[in-house]
Image (cartoon, rainbow, N blue to C red):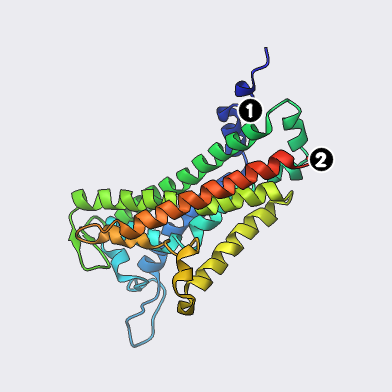
Amino acid sequence: MYNARKTLPYRIEMYRQLKRKRTLFAYVFVMSLPIIVALAVKFGTSGNSTGPTRFGSGTADLIGLATKGALNFTSTMFYFATPFLLVAVISIFNGDTVASEANWSTLRYLLASPVPRSRLLFQKLKVSLTLSAFAIVILVGTSWVVGEIAFGNAPLLTPLGVTMAPHMAIPRLLIVAGYLAINLLSVAGLAFYLSVATDVPLGAVGGAIGIMILSNILDAITGLGTLRNWLPTHYSFSWFDAFSATIDWTQMIRGASYAVMLFGILISLAVLRFGKKDVTS
């Protein structure tokens, strides 16, 4: 007997997405950041010497705190990854998911199975969000391992001048990871909406990345005043407050609330658009 709830199971869709080369590429992309930074700091040319420098001197200092142990290295990778790397990876997972099916001319066959349109969207959304969460976990895990190997273990020295022992620092890093996962929902929602709106995967992914880059540029223009508060990237670095002696949750709560609200609006628009869309591919 036909049961709409049993069509396109989560595990099947997850398996399909994990097999794709773009998934492997995205995760390798995330893992490469801490490795490249560690190699550059460990084996780069000296930035402090007044005389000639040579590759392999091991005295280069990209960001001083990054060399002060695994905890500091991980927090620095958050800083590097927030404005572009995580935006790009999450745009890939969420912007490619529906548009790629249309591009391959398989979308109409999925709907003819028959998979209800709303179920198809939500199953794909659940998988793309899961893959996005994996990317953040991989960033944290890789940064920690690379930092431990390259720089050892030491207390966390925050940019705010606070020193934290590991038992205090680890929960703070988990708070940062959790906040990033919620804050980046705005990117996921935008990319997913564009994936429904177009049949070109590159257009959906590139469109989401381009809009976020534009948002960062506009956020730097102080003349816009309070209008900047409504930009999707305005609260991207509010996780810095997690590194203060006493956590100030104000900006993180605002950023998370705005991201969830924007995500809900964009997903609702995607469902409405897909429900009326003439699927011919």
Q: Nearer the viewer, residue 140 or 149?
A: 140
Element under label 1?
Answer: loop
Q: Nearer the viewer, residue 205 or 230?
A: 230
- Mark 2 or 1, closer to the camera: 2
Q: CA distance from mark 2 to mark 1?
A: 20 Å
Tally of marks: 2
Against 156, residue 120 (above or below) is above
Element under label 2?
Answer: loop
Which numbered disc flags the more N-terminal residue, 2 or 1? 1
Q: Is residue 93 left or right of residue 233?
A: right
- Is there a contact, CB below 8 Å, between mark 2 and mark 1? no
Indicate the position of residue 221 as horizontal and vertical percent values. Answer: 49, 77
Kind of residue at badge 1 = Leu
- Specify the label residue 8 is tagged with: 1
Q: Residues within 10 Å of mark 2 (few under 14, many from 20)?
A: few
Q: Residues within 10 Å of mark 1 (few under 14, many from 20)?
A: some
Looking at the rendering, which quadrant does residue 20 occupy? Answer: top right
Q: Is residue 126 left or right of residue 20?
A: left
Q: Is residue 260 left or right of residue 194?
A: left
Indicate the position of residue 262 as horizontal and vertical percent values. Answer: 52, 52
- Specify the label residue 58 is tagged with: none
Residue situated furthest top in the rendering: 1
Kind of residue at badge 2 = Thr
Name the residue rendered at 23%, 53% in the picture: 169
- Specify the label residue 280 is tagged with: 2
Q: Is residue 214 visible?
A: yes
Against 216, residue 25 (above or below) is above
Looking at the rendering, which quadrant does residue 161 occupy? Answer: bottom left
**Quick one: quadrant of the N terminus?**
top right
Q: Is residue 36 visible?
A: no
Q: Nearer the viewer, residue 179 or 101?
A: 179
